[in-house]
Image: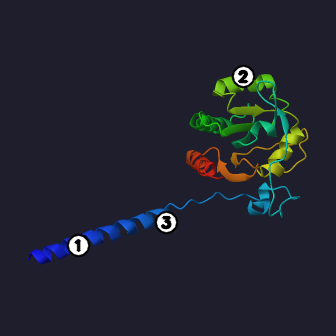
């Protein structure tokens, strides 16, 4: 009888060890780090991509830019050097999706406030209306923190070209002229190499949660 229990005890110990190994292997398999895709124009809905770059398969990056923020300061790509950032397009007089998007961007700002690697960048699509003074009023109203979040205005053609050819963000086509107008709900996640790593619907809370999760994934990259 004692021999039986002794053998059973050994069996239980061995079985327990094997079980722990199996559970660990399954856990590690299910939690393997999965890098975010690097979006190229060819991978994106053609309706969102300028016809001149629709077939581009690699090397796509956000172009250099020079715009003015809510404090009248010149903002360029150098202000976002070695930063992960979230970009979007809006206008201060919008009464439809923009207030929702701005509220959600404020939620993102709250989550990244103490993270020196992450910033936000919002481009107005009506720069003729959204002057520095107007952006400053809007920034104060929406709780924009100047250290984390730039609202930028400037040359309309440059902003529209960034939207269409860099951020792959809008369906409409045009030349950035007086009657050209874009309106997009998209948030774009940009990595430290100026590459697009994610697209999100800025009006949907579930997409904002996914964005925050993807920022954490992106931060793990070397």
Q: Nearer the viewer, mark 3 or mark 1?
A: 1
- Rendered view: 141 above or below 28: above
Note whether residue 90 is visible: no
Q: Circle 1 sits in a helix, a strand or a loop, which is it?
A: helix
- Image point 69% across, 53% down: which residue? 197
Name the residue tied to disc 3. 29
- Image point 85% across, 59% down: which residue? 53
Please give the label number shown on residue 137: 2
Point out residue 121 in the picture as x, y percentages from the top left corner: 73, 38
- Image point 73% across, 37% down: which residue? 122
- Residue 116: image quadrant is top right
- Image point 64% across, 57% down: which residue? 36
Note whether residue 31 is visible: yes
Point out residue 211 in the picture as x, y percentages from the top left corner: 61, 48
Instruction: Estimate how packed mark 2 is, as few (under 14), some (14 to 19) or many (20 or more) residues with alpha carbons within 10 Å.
Output: few
Instruction: Estimate how packed mark 3 is, as few (under 14), some (14 to 19) or many (20 or more) residues with alpha carbons within 10 Å.
Output: few
Q: Is disc 3 in contact with disc 1, using a CB cutoff of under 8 Å?
A: no
Say left or right for 75 vs 36. Answer: right
Q: Circle 3 sits in a helix, a strand or a loop, which is it?
A: helix
Q: Is disc 2 in contact with disc 3, using a CB cutoff of under 8 Å?
A: no
Q: Nearer the viewer, mark 2 or mark 3?
A: 3
Front residue (pair 110, 135)? 110
Please give the label number shown on residue 10: 1
């Amino acid at each position: 009888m004692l021999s039986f229990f002794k053998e059973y005890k050994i069996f239980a110990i061995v079985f327990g060890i094997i079980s722990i190994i199996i559970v660990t292997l399954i856990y590690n398999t299910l939690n393997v780090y999965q890098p975010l895709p690097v979006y190229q124009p060819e991978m994106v809905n053609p309706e969102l991509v300028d016809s001149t770059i629709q077939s581009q398969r690699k090397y796509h990056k956000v172009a250099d830019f020079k715009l003015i923020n809510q404090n009248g300061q010149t903002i360029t790509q150098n202000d976002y050097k070695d930063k992960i950032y979230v970009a979007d397009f809006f206008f201060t007089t919008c009464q439809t999706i923009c207030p929702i998007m701005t509220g959600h961007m404020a939620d993102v700002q709250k989550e990244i406030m103490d993270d020196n690697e992450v910033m936000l960048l919002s481009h107005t699509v009506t720069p003729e209306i959204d002057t520095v003074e107007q952006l400053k009023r809007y920034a104060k109203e929406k709780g924009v923190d100047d250290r984390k979040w730039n609202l930028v205005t400037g040359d309309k053609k440059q902003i529209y070209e960034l939207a269409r050819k860099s951020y792959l963000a809008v369906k409409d086509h045009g030349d950035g002229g007086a009657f050209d107008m874009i309106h997009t709900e998209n948030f774009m996640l940009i990595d430290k190499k100026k590459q697009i790593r994610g697209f999100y619907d800025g009006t949907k809370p579930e997409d904002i949660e996914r964005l925050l999760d993807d920022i954490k994934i992106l931060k793990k990259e070397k």
